[in-house]
Image (spheres, rainbow, N blue to C red):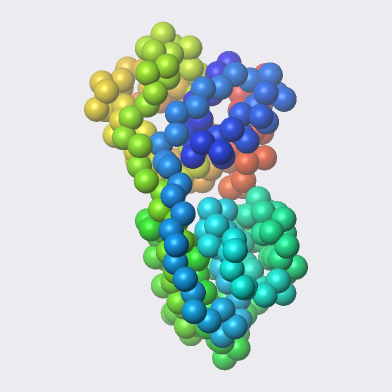
């Protein structure tokens, strides 16, 4: 069994290491490239909390003067673990997706205690910001990275797809799902998708692959990497 990994290169390599432990093969062809943006925040002290809807947003906290006791609300456990490794003492994980994070922040925080700083990527969904503001919070948005699209697959992966050597693909975001579908159509690889099982982090990701025919579309029970690996482990029995 061989899985196509499409996350940014460092993320894909970490997933690849986990697949190795399961004796599952892989090929890597990132559909997104992370580029950090230099974005100076003048006054961190005024914020009661910082929220991060992705691990990449944590790049915005490297080499800053944010106090280590700052409450930092993280979308998932991988993000909160990374924040702890950076030395922060008050990382709170929603252990879910952006919607879970928003609900947790609304439950735990109070608008009168001060504004919230939302660190995100260039193409981040505005729902998090909108829902917080509708709940009475003042939210300052700071774009700290850009996930640039890679509108192709590697020659090695294309060759493997044509030879039907790849059995499945991991997709972690609606955006990467859309990119993959666009690339498959542009390269006239639609017939290749018929033999692929798509493993999706969430139903939102699965919704973006409906315009192609797949062998199967599977959705993780919870939006985290452990559940993704569990999915492919079940299929590999």
**From this viewpoint, is residue 167 visible?**
yes
Give percent across and percent down for residue 95.
65, 56
Residue for point 42% across, 41% down: 32
Residue for point 63% across, 35% down: 14
Give percent across and percent down for residue 79.
63, 54
**From this viewpoint, is residue 101 visible?**
no
The answer to which quarter of the image holds residue 44 is bottom right
Give percent across and percent down for residue 214.
40, 25
6 on left or right of 191: right
Residue for point 65% across, 50% down: 78
Q: How many marks?
A: 0
Q: Quadrant of the N terminus?
A: top right
Eyeballing the image, is 23 above or below 92?
Answer: above
The answer to which quarter of the image holds residue 185 is top left
65 on left or right of 131: right
The answer to which quarter of the image holds residue 191 is top left
94 on left or right of 10: right
Q: Quadrant of the C terminus?
A: top right
Eyeballing the image, is 114 above or below 29?
Answer: below
Residue for point 61% across, 23% down: 235
């Amino acid at each position: 069994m061989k899985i196509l990994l499409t996350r940014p290169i460092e993320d894909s390599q970490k997933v690849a290491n986990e697949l190795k432990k399961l004796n599952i093969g892989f090929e890597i062809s990132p559909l997104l490239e992370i580029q950090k943006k230099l974005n100076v925040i003048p006054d961190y002290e005024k914020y009661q909390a910082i929220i991060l809807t992705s691990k990449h947003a944590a790049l915005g906290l490297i080499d800053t003067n944010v106090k280590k006791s700052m409450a930092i609300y993280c979308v998932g456990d991988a993000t909160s673990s990374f924040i702890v490794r950076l030395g922060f003492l008050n990382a709170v994980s929603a252990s879910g997706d952006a919607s879970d994070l928003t609900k947790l922040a609304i439950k735990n925080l109070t608008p009168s205690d001060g504004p919230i700083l939302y660190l995100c990527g260039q193409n981040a969904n505005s729902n998090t910001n909108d829902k917080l503001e509708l709940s009475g919070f003042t939210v300052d948005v700071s774009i700290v990275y850009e996930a640039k699209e890679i509108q192709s697959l590697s020659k090695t992966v294309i060759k493997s797809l044509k030879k039907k050597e790849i059995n499945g693909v991991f997709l972690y975001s609606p955006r990467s799902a859309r990119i993959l579908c666009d690339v498959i159509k542009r390269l006239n690889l639609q017939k290749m998708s018929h033999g692929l099982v798509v493993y999706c982090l969430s139903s939102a990701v699965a919704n973006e692959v409906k315009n192609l025919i797949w062998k199967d579309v599977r959705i993780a029970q919870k939006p985290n990497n452990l559940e993704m690996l569990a999915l492919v482990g079940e299929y590999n029995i």
